[in-house]
Amino acid sequence: MTKFIFITGGVVSSLGKGIACASIGKILEARGFKVALVKCDPYINVDPGTMNPFQHGEVYVTDDGAETDLDLGHYERFTHARLTKNNNITTGKIYFSVISKERRGDYLGKTVQVVPHITDEIKGSIKKLSEGGHNDIVIVEIGGTVGDIESLPFLEAIRQLKQELGAMNAINIHLTLIPYIRSADEIKTKPTQHSVGKLREIGIQPEILLCRSEKSIDLDVKQKIALFCNVREGAVIEALDVKSIYEVPLMFKKDGLDDLILNCLRLKSKKGDLRSWSQDVVGVVKDPKAACRIAVVGKYITLQDAYKSIYEALIHGGISNHAKVEIVKIDSEDVKTHRVRDLFCDVDGILVPGGFGYRGIEGKINAIEFARKEGIPYFGICLGMQTAVIEFARNACGLDDANSTEFNSKTPYPVISLLEEQKNVKAKGASMRLGAYPARIASGTKAHAAYKKGLISERHRHRYEFNKDFKKALEKHGMIVSGVSPNGLLVEIVELKDHPWFVAVQFHPEFKSKPDCAHPLFREFVKAALKKQ
């Protein structure tokens, strides 16, 4: 029977439930179990696809084209789980499904209520991950903070589900905060007591507490927490602040969290270890042999989570080269023509990520022109490819007013234009080109040298494409189209002929990068940046 781990958070948000879930998945995989992970988000949006990055952060895309929460990125980076639309449940999805059933008459005239109809829908969505017996353990993260009104249906659903499954088949882990009051040189347990008390009010008793703290928790403090929160002393686990998120699985393993979970779930396995993770990932992060500086030029740069997968993939590229990557965050609106050299004089590479809308576009184009002319390694992703094409058309091909029809519908040189199938689309949600698509790579190119194969599959999230009517004009001046869709109609990768490393892609390679298996393009980009030094 599939076992379930329900993970909740208390006291404050942003404690790192996603990292905790991913790390638990990692240490359980090391013990030989196949894990699945699911994120339950209490917002009423069906998915985060139409939400502003300043509101929500990065939208993570799965192979099947689902726009999901960024925590799913942590799940895939840390574990071998392959995620789909079923791995992200939102209040919007749940209500949409229930209301659709009600309109069809599926409830046969019954009054539709939060309990049992909404909670049953949540339980059914969670249990999908256990169907077919493919997964040994399903880890369920409940978004938000205990005490929030909007997350109550999810908490009630997991309370019911645990009761139905039985104590040996499901456990609750609560991630909480133990604040350190610096002026008093004390750590305080009262917020955790209140948070667990709130959980117990609604019928959930956690078996394990993960205690976030910047300072180590003494034995007497653990005993106090255990007493007042009704858990065993050995079930109070430190979750100390670390320099790298990739240290968290090692910390949990050291504290015996895997043994504790398996004992609670009555599971037996061989002793697993994280030696490779410790040496090949964390060891390199702590003791790199080289370093380089990469500028990320974006429009949402002030929000850490807006480019989360980009930042992590750059770190992975560094790990694969035994190097530290220092990320220099540059707001594209600050990249004025007269400031370009000052902003980029001491960087070894420039990356322009994806995005939407005209704000900051000219700054990105200025940065790309500087990278192209100065021979600085450049990596463009999604919009970063489109702006690279615009820059090259304007400044290398003499098409002065070249642009994307997203920014100027009347441009005489629409080198980037709307996909044909997108022209009649009115709805915004889940209506882009989404998910995994194949591409053919031309031999003898930098892209082929990175991938070492001619056919790849990468994840997409965009509406606009390279306009192939301008392909010959751009190729004539030195642009190489190195990757195309299998039917040859869509351009996926472009490069520059006479440049140390200038590669731009229409897809999002950052979504397939892992710390112990860097995406080949990020690996080669960082290698080129190190070589520039």
Image: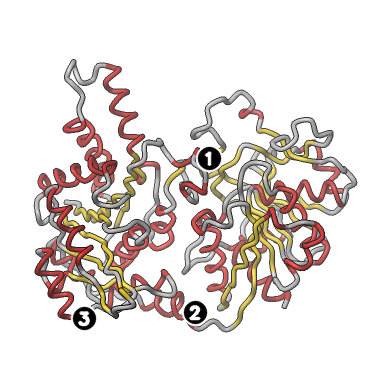
Image quadrant of residue 153? top left
Residue occupied by mark 3:
218
Name the N-terminal-most of marks 1 and 2.
2
- Most extreme residue toward the right, as rendered? 398
Q: State the SS at label 1.
A: strand
Front-most of residues 160 and 379: 160
Residue occupied by mark 1:
434
For the residues marked 1 and 2, what is the alpha-carbon distance in whole angstroms? 34 Å
Residue 331 placement (x, y as % from top left): 65, 57
Residue occupied by mark 2:
284
**How many residues crowd around disc 1 within 10 Å: few (fewer than 14), some, or many (20 or more)?**
many
Q: State the SS at label 3.
A: loop
Q: Is residue 286 above or below residue 491?
A: below
- What residue is shown at x 37% (from left), y 58% (from top)? 14
In front: mark 2 or mark 3? 3
Amino acid at circle 1: Leu
For the residues marked 3 and 1, what is the alpha-carbon distance in whole angstroms? 49 Å
Q: Tell whether 505 sits left or right of 373.
A: left
Q: Are marks 1 and 2 in contact (CB under 8 Å)?
A: no
- What residue is shown at x 64% (from left), y 26% (from top)? 423
Q: Is residue 257 above or below residue 302?
A: below
Residue 145 placement (x, y as % from top left): 29, 52
Residue 307 placement (x, y as % from top left): 54, 56
In front: mark 3 or mark 1? 3
- What residue is shown at x 16% (from left), y 57% (from top)? 171
Amino acid at circle 3: Asp
